Image (cartoon, coloured by chain):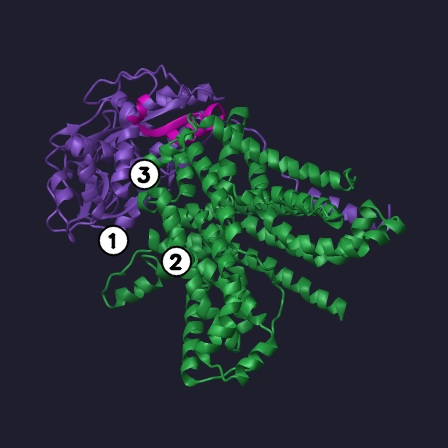
Amino acid sequence: MKTINRVQLPGLVLAISIFIFVLMAIATLLKYSPSLDLTVIWSDTYYRHITQFSFYQALLSTLLSVLLAIPISHALFRREFFGKKLLLKLFATTLVLPVLVAIFGLLAIYGNSGLLATFFDYFEQPLPFSIYGLNGILLAHVFFNTPFACRLFLQSLQAIPEQQHQIASQLGLKHLNKFRFVEWPAIKGQLAHITGLIFMLCFTSFASVMALGGGPKATTIELAIYQAIKFDFDLATGALLALWQICLCTLLSIFIQKFTSHNELNTQQQGDKNSFKYDSFFSKCWDIAWISAIIIFVVPPLLMVIIAGINSELLSILTDNTFWKALKNSFLIASFASIIAVTSAFFILLTSRQWRLHGFQHRADKVEMFGAIILVTPGIVISTGLFLLLREAGNLSHLSFYIVVAVNAMMALPFVLKSLAQPMLNNAQKYEKLCASLGVFSLNRFYWIEWKALRVTILHALCLSFVLSIGDLSAIALFGSQSFTTLPLYLFQLLGSYQMQAAAVVALVLLILSVLVFVFIEKLFQEKRVIHD
Amino acid sequence: MDNIVKNKLITLIGLAALFVMPTQAEQQNLTIYTYSSFASDWGPGPKIEAAFEKQCQCDLKFVALDDGVSVLNRLRLEGKNSEADIILGLDDSLMATAKETGLLSEHNIDSSSLKLSKPWNDDTFLPFDYGYFAFIYNSEKLKNPPSSLAELVKRDDLSIIYQDPRTSTPGLGLMLWMKSVYGEQSSEAWKKLAKKTVTVTKGWSEAYSMFLKGESDMVLSYTTSPAYHIIAEGKQQYKAANFSEGHYQQTEVAAMVKNSSNKTLAKAFMQFILSDDFQSQIATGNWMYPVTDITLPTEFKQLTKPVKTISFSSDEIAEKRKTWTREWLTALTD
C-alpha cells in the first residue's frame, strides 16, 4: 500500500494543516523575537526566576498530588461505603471542570473572606495563610490532580488479579507486607507515567496561576507570556518566552516519553473487588482518615459554588446583557470547537487506521502526533503566535472568535484522538473487508458501520471536548475584550474586581452547564448497556 | 444516498443553521476607552455620558479597562484597528510613550480655560483632572501614620496594598515617586516595601476595595480620596498621610485616536471635557481636582495639600520606564 487511499486524503490534509497552523504561529513568534538567543532568558534574573518558579511549583504540585493519591486510592480500594460511586464520579470531573469554577470554590473556603477566615474571625484570629501566591497555586493543582491520580491508581489496583489476593491471604500477608508485595507493584507500574502527566499539566497550567498567583513572585512562564503582551506590550519578549516554553515542553515530553513505559488503562473498567482483605482497627481508622480527608478537601469547594451561587445577585446577573452575551459566546465556541475537534479526529484516525491495518505503524503514529501537537505547544503559545500574525493582517476583533474556536478545538483534539483511536481501529479490523465486499462506502459506511458502533464513544468525545472548551481561559485571555467575553473570562473579571456575589452566580452557571453535559454522557452509557443486554 | 442518512443530514444542517450568529446593526456612536473606576456606576462616567448624549444625539460607550496603563496597552495591541475614538485616563507620565505609537491625533482645542499650576501646551493630550498620589489610612485603626515615604519603607508594623506599575497609573506613579526619593537605592527600598505588601493589584479599584475591607493598613490612592468618605459617606476617619519628601503629582489626560471613524464627534467630546458639565463631575465623581476654575466643594478644604510636588518629564519616563519596571519586578522576586 504505497499509494494513499482516497479515504485517507482528508485526514492527511487536516493533519498537515494543523501542522502548518502551528508552524505559522511559531514562525510569527520567531519573526517577532529580535534575537533567537534563548540564553538571554537564562541571564536575566527575572526570567530565570519565573523559569525556576514554573519548575518548582510543578514539582511541588506533582509530589503533593501523587503522594496524597497513593494512600487515598489504597484506602478507596480497600473500602466499600455509601456514596463511593458518586465520589469516584466526582473525581472524574475535577480535571475537566472549568478551572475557574473550582478556584471560586476554593476561594470561598480558603480565601481572605472565605469560610475558614470567618471561622478564625470568630476566635478573633487572622487567617494564618494567604491563598494568593504559591499556596493557592499548590492548593488548586492538588485539587485538580489528586482525584485524577487517585482514579488512575485505583484502576491499576483493581487490575490486580483475584488470585494474587488469595495467595496473599494464604501467605498471611498483612497491611504493610501486602502493600509492599501486592499493591505497591501495581501502583509502581503507573507511577512514572502519572507523575509525568501531572507534571506536564501543572507546568503548563494557566488559569490557576493567573487567578491565584500572578504577582511577580508567583509567575510562571505561561503567565509571563501573557503579561509581556498584555501588560508591557513587549511583543519581542512575549515571543521569546513562548519559544522558550515550547523548548521546555518539548524537552519535558521527550524526557517523560523516554523514561515512562505506558500500559494502556481502560478507564471504563470496573475492577475486581478486593474480597480477601485482612482488617484491623488500626487499618480501618487509617483508611477512614484518608477517605474523610479527601472528601473534606474535594466536596466543600464544589458545594460552596452551589450554595454561594444562589444569592441576591442571581436575578440581576440573569437579566444582565453581558452575562447572556458571554453565555452565548461560550456556548458557540464550545459547540464549534468540539464539533471541529471530533470531526478532525475522526478523519485523522481514518487515515491512521488505514495505515495501521496495513502495518505502517510509524506513519500512523506520525499522523496522530500532528493532531496532538498542541501538547508541546501550549494554547497560550499558539494564541500568541496567531495574535501577532493576525494583528498585522487585519481586523483582530472580527477574527478573534474564529481563533478562539480553532485554538480550543486543537486543545481538545489530543483527548478526542485518545478516546477514539482504539475503538475506530477495532471497528476497521472487524468490518473493513466486509464493507469492501458489500460495497459500503462514504456516508453509508459512516452511518451504518462507524456511527452505529461508535455513537456512544463519539458523543462522549464530543461532550468531553465541549466541557474542556467551555471552561478554557487560555485562548480567550488574549483575544477577549469588553465586547467579546466568554463565561470563564467574565467570571475572571468579576473575581478580579471582587464582585464575589456576581462571580458566584456565574460560577454556578458554568458548573451546571458542565454537570449537565456529564449527565448527558451518563445517560448515553446507560443506553448502551440496554442495547447490549 | 440512503434515505435515513439523508434525513439525518438535513437535521444536522438544520441544527447548524441555529448556530448562525446574528449581526449587529451599525449606529452612530462614540467609543471611549477608560479605566474601570471612571466608567463604573459610582464613578463620574454615567453622569458625563448622560450629559454628553443630551447635546450630541449619539450613543456614548465607555469601555472599562483595569487601569490607565491598560488603556494604552489595549490601544497598542489593537493598533490601527482599534474601536476606540477617544482614550481617556492615561496620565502625564505616559504621554511621550503614547505619542510614539503614532495612533493618536492632535486635538486643536483652545486650552486657555485650563487653570493648572503650569501652562498646558500639549497638542495631542488634553488634561481632564489632576491629583497627588498618597497613602490612605483609617485614622481609627492606625494611630501613628508614617510622615514620610522613607518612614513607610523603614517601618515593619504596617501593611500596604498598591497597584502594578505595568497596568495602573497610581502604580506607575509610586514607581516614579520611589525613584525620585531613592534614586539608585530604589531596589533595596522596593525589597523592604515588599515585606509589608499584602498584594499588588492590577487596578486602583481592586486595591481600594480590598483596603476598605480591612485587608491592609494603608493603600496607594490620592490625597483627594478622603473627600469621598467625607462627602458621600459622612465619615471622617479616612485620611491621606502627608509625606515630607513631597507627593508625586498626576495629571490625567485624554486624546483622540487617529483612526477614529467619528472624528467630529470625538472632537466635540474633547471640547466637552473642558465644559462645566464635565468638570463639575470630577471633584465629587472621580474625586480629583478639576482642571478649570469651577468651584470646589467646601469639604475639599479639609484635605491635605502637599507642600512639595514631584514629577518627572514624560520623555524621561518614556526612556526609562522599562528599566525601572524591570528593577521593580526583580526586586520583588528576590
Q: Magenta segment: does it hold B85?
A: yes
What kind of residue is marked 3? Tyr
> Which mark is in front, 2 or 1?
2
Rendered colour, chain A = green
Q: Tell me the subunit letter for badge 1.
A: B
Rendered colour, chain B = purple
Location of mark 1 (residue): B214
In contact (CB < 8 Å): disc 2 and disc 1: no
Label 2: which secondary element: helix
Location of mark 2 (residue): A139
Q: Residues within 10 Å of mark 2 (few under 14, many from 20)?
A: many
Q: Is residue A27 left or right of residue A36?
A: right
- In the image, A65 versus A210, the foreground residue is A65
x then y, percent, for residue A445: 81, 49
Q: Tell me the subunit letter for badge 2.
A: A
Q: Is residue A499 visible in the rendered structure shown here? A: no
What kind of residue is marked 2? Leu
Range of magenta residues: B72-96
In the image, what residue occupies the spot 40% across and 60% down?
A: A64
Location of mark 3 (residue): A46
Q: Residue furthest right?
A: A438
Quadrant assignment, res A368: top right
In the image, what residue occupies the spot 45% across and 79% down?
A: A175
